């Protein structure tokens, strides 16, 4: 959310049908920022007099862990000024206040019982690929704490966020929630019971570190509910992170059959498998379906744009990336693709603008790379790993992490060695470190792949000049003038004896 965004008041309204004698304020106004995910934490029902300040411990721990510990998820933890005593009442409060997650329960001297209840807060006429019952079957869970001063449900609330994002089709947010749990070192509550939701929460706890066991756990949910497409989507992710693309494809195609091919997320997921198995044209065709199913998902536009770019269709790539950015992406790679495309055309202002956004709004390239890898199964040496390594290299270079940028570029080249941009990135990084000979070699390889790449002639001219090869530098400057994009560079370089265009001028 951009700084200074206006906040929208949320009303807590009394729903008399359910509340009865329970204490609830008639009206309570609270400011929640647009785009944030609201988690309402109700007061706990006190079952005896021995409980003191349990509500405060529960709320403060959630606010600290979820809101402050995982800020990129943009979750707003809010205390609801009343007690909730039933699932029906929780649903009513959620509907009245547009809250996707309600935290409610009761406390006694021996035990604190906390319920997480998920709701689809979309308008009634919104089209969904699956019913709300699929979400609630997967996400509604009861947790039991013996000592709320030492235990917390932060991992479970982040998992609830992941389940909700899976249902609404926001794939990047699923990965963000899981990586937040991992990075914060949250172990989670030991969820007892054999309910379907209990298996789902255990699955998410295991997914990143032990996908094999995660698969065995989600299998238990599938045995109880074999027609819930969410569970096939979940198992797909585990198979993907194992590198088992055949099993992953089978599961995501099952999810598509169960949703009559209306799930934008499942279509996006299938495209990442097809990119590896069959190639970019097949993946792009499925992304066409994904965008038609839900044109408001930035990730589908961004991935299709990236695949167009990697397939050599730069015009189509630019159009898709512009649309992804118009939808305010929650990841940095659309801005990186835009910067690369603009650099090719000599649109320096656009390069600088895209890189500035990528660096200020998404300052952790490691997290961004891990998010893409989690969603595409990029752990193997396949084309999705190339996707991750290339954009990670460019992002690290923009941040000044040249050693890491070189390593990422070399990883990408080991997978695919026919794209000029990765050699451009490598050449700039080598130049910044002062290895002008290695930089020149990288630029030369790039130009052999793409002889019309204007900026690379200019960058190679600089490193040749640094090595005392003035003739070679002038030859490169002349060659640059023969390229189609020269007109955009000419105003910057009207006098070649005065012009300073080197690796430090872009990064």
Image: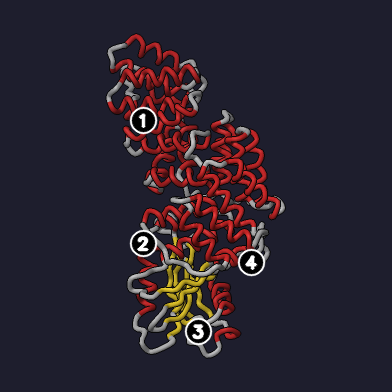
At x 54% / y 42%, what residue is drawn? 302
Q: Position of residue 315 (x, y in %)?
A: 58, 32
Location of the C terminus (image quadrant): top left
Q: Which residue is mark 4?
A: 133
Which of the 4 image quadrants contains residue 441?
Answer: top left
Residue occupied by mark 2 = 68
Which residue is label 1 attached to?
A: 406
Image location (x, y in percent) of residue 55 = 39, 78
* 3 and 4 marks in contact (CB < 8 Å): no
Disc 4 residue crowd, few under 14, some 14–19, many 20+, Cα 10 Å: few
Residue indicated by mark 3:
26
Which mark is in front, 1 or 3?
1
The answer to which of 188 and 37 lies nearer the viewer is 188
Disc 2/disc 4 C-alpha distance (Å): 31 Å
Disc nearest the viewer among 3 and 4: 4
Classify 10 Å Cα crowding around label 2: few (below 14), some (14-19), many (20 and above). some
Would you identify the image quadrant in which residue 425 lies? Answer: top left
Sort mark 1 into few (<14), some (14-19) or many (20+) by Cα contacts within 10 Å. many
Which-is-in-front pick, marks 2 and 4?
Answer: 4
Up-down relation of residue 213 to residue 507 (above or below): below
Q: Earlier in the sequence, mark 4 or mark 1?
A: 4
- Name which residue lies at 49% across and 63% down: 37
Q: Nearer the viewer, mark 3 or mark 2?
A: 2
Q: Position of residue 232 (x, y in %)?
A: 61, 53
> Is disc 2 placed on a helix, strand or loop?
helix
Q: Are marks 2 and 4 in contact (CB under 8 Å)?
A: no
């Amino acid at each position: 959310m951009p700084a200074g965004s206006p906040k929208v008041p949320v009303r807590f309204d009394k729903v008399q049908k359910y509340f009865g004698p329970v204490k609830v304020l008639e009206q309570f106004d609270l400011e929640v920022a647009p785009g944030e995910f609201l988690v309402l934490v109700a007061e706990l029902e006190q079952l005896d007099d021995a409980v003191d300040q349990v509500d405060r411990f529960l709320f403060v721990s959630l606010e600290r862990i979820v809101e402050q510990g995982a800020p990129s998820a943009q979750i707003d933890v809010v205390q609801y000024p009343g007690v909730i005593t039933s699932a029906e009442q929780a649903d009513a409060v959620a509907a009245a206040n547009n809250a996707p997650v309600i935290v409610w329960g009761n406390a006694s001297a021996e035990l604190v019982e906390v319920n997480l209840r998920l709701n689809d807060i979309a308008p009634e006429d919104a089209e969904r690929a699956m019913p709300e019952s699929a979400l609630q079957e997967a996400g509604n869970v009861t947790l039991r704490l013996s000592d709320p001063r030492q235990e917390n449900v932060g991992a479970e609330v982040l998992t609830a966020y992941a389940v909700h994002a899976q249902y609404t089709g926001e794939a990047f947010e699923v990965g963000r929630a899981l990586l937040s749990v991992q990075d914060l070192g949250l172990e989670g509550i030991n969820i007892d019971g054999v309910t379907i939701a209990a298996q789902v929460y255990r699955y998410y706890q295991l997914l990143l570190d032990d996908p094999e066991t995660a698969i065995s756990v989600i299998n238990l949910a599938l045995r109880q509910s074999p027609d819930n497409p969410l569970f096939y989507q979940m198992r797909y992710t585990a198979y993907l992170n194992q590198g088992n693309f055949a099993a992953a494809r089978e599961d995501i195609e099952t999810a598509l059959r169960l949703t009559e091919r209306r799930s934008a997320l499942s279509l996006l997921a299938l495209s990442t498998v097809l990119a590896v198995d069959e190639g970019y044209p097949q993946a792009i065709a499925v992304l066409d379906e994904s965008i038609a199913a839900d044109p408001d998902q930035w990730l589908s536009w961004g991935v299709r744009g990236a695949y167009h770019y990697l397939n050599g269709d730069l015009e189509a790539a630019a159009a898709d990336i512009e649309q992804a950015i118009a939808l305010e992406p929650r990841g940095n790679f659309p801005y990186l693709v835009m910067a690369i495309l603009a650099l090719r055309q000599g649109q320096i202002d656009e390069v600088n603008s895209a890189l500035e956004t990528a660096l200020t709004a998404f300052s952790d390239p490691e997290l961004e790379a891990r998010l893409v890898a989690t969603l595409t199964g990029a752990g193997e040496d396949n084309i999705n790993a190339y996707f991750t390594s290339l954009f990670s290299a460019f992002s690290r270079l923009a941040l000044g992490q040249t050693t890491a940028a070189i390593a990422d570029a070399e990883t990408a080249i080991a997978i695919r060695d026919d794209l000029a941009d990765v050699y451009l990135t490598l050449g700039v990084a080598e130049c910044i470190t002062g290895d002008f000979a290695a930089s020149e070699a990288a630029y030369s390889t790039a130009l052999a792949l793409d002889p019309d790449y204007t900026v690379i002639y200019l960058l190679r001219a600089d490193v040749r000049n640094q090595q005392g090869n003035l003739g070679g530098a002038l030859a490169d400057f002349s060659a640059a003038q023969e390229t189609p994009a020269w007109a955009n560079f000419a105003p910057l370089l009207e006098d070649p004896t005065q012009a300073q265009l080197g690796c430090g001028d872009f990064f």
